[in-house]
Image (tube, rainbow, N blue to C red):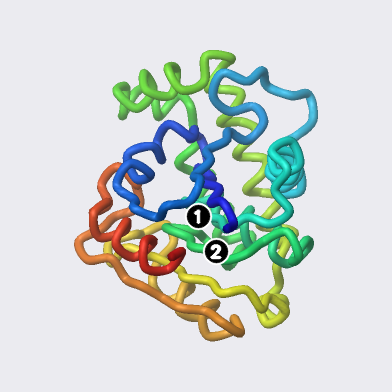
């Protein structure tokens, strides 16, 4: 029975996914991990890159003797899961995503990095800045700067091309909120149609932050998908 790995989003930590895990009823191991530089981990000298985060997942799997794992990825974590499925298909079982930007371009990256201005975060959303300080005691400003660099790199070099989705044969369920201005329904549906075994579920009255998602509804979908 394959365990399920839960992967957090940009600027996030695994703690954000614990309320979701608590809602599940899967009768199989659930594991949460932080990507390098996130949470209490020291921030590495190397840049944030999708390949490095994928390495983190594989290292965790090897440490725990997992030959294969199912994966749930929120936002950036969902893209890491898809990159793993394409590059290491034998290590990945089923994949579920939530709020994941799947189609990257320079325009998309430039749109997203506007939300990573640390001065504006402190000025306009001081409560969020305080939360980021708690999440990343090693320095949330550096995490934000490295995340900005990561997104710009993705914009100029998407790890999965429009035709690359067709090479992924895994069972994938894409969740997107009907009020998610980050991921959006249109791009989620477009990728879903390209996947050999893709499914799309639209969550009602749901913006991008996982804290504002209907976790009971999402958990119901995951219980069904991973059981």
Figure check: 103 above or below 123: below
92 relative position to 46: left or right:
left
Q: Position of residue 57 (x, y in %)?
A: 68, 44
Q: Residue at x 63, y 59 (%)?
A: 106
- Whether the residues at callouts 1 and 2 have beta carbons within 8 Å, the answer is yes
Q: Check disc 2 and report its element: helix, strand or loop.
A: strand
Please count the marks in the image.
2
Could you say which disc has been placed on residue 95 in the image? 2
Q: Position of residue 124 (x, y in %)?
A: 31, 28
37 relative position to 72: left or right:
right
In which quadrant is the N terminus drawn?
A: bottom right
Q: Check disc 1 and report its element: helix, strand or loop.
A: strand
- Report if residue 48 is visible in the image: no
Quadrant of residue 44 within the rendered picture = top right
In which quadrant is the C terminus drawn?
A: bottom left
Distance between mark 1 and mark 2 Cα atoms: 6 Å
220 relative position to 129: left or right:
left
Q: Residue at x 31, y 58 (%)?
A: 218
- Report if residue 223 is visible in the image: yes
**Quick one: which residue is furthest to the left in this view?**
205
Q: Nearer the viewer, residue 43 or 69?
A: 69
Q: Position of residue 144 (x, y in %)?
A: 56, 31
Badge 1 crowding class, 10 Å Cα cut-off, few under 14, some 14 to 19, many 20 or more, is: many
Q: Nearer the viewer, residue 37 or 21?
A: 21
Query: Between disc 1 and disc 2, whose residue precedes?
Result: 1
Q: Position of residue 118 (x, y in %)?
A: 48, 27
Q: Which residue is mark 1?
A: 72
Figure check: 180 above or below 59: below
Q: Residue at x 46, y 68 (%)?
A: 174
Badge 2 crowding class, 10 Å Cα cut-off, few under 14, some 14 to 19, many 20 or more, is: many
């Amino acid at each position: 029975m394959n365990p399920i790995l839960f992967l957090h989003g940009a600027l996030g930590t695994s703690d954000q996914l614990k309320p979701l895990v608590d809602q599940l009823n899967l009768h199989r191991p659930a594991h949460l991990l932080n990507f390098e530089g996130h949470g209490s981990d020291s921030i590495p000298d190397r840049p944030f890159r999708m390949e490095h985060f994928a390495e983190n997942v594989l290292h965790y799997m090897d440490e725990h003797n997992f030959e294969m794992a199912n994966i749930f990825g929120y936002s950036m974590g969902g893209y890491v899961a898809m990159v793993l499925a394409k590059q290491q298909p034998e290590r990945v079982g089923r994949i579920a995503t939530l709020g994941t930007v799947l189609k990257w371009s320079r325009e998309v990256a430039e749109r997203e990095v506007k939300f990573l201005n640390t001065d504006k975060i402190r000025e306009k959303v001081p409560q969020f800045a305080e939360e980021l300080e708690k999440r990343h005691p090693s320095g949330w400003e550096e995490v934000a700067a490295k995340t900005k660099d990561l997104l710009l790199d993705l914009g100029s070099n998407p790890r999965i091309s429009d035709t690359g989705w067709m090479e992924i044969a895994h069972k994938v369920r894409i969740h997107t909120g009907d009020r998610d201005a980050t991921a959006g329904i249109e791009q989620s549906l477009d990728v879903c149609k390209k996947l050999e075994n893709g499914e799309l579920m639209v969550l009602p009255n749901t913006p991008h932050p996982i804290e504002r998602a209907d976790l009971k509804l999402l958990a119901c979908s995951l219980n069904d998908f991973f059981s």
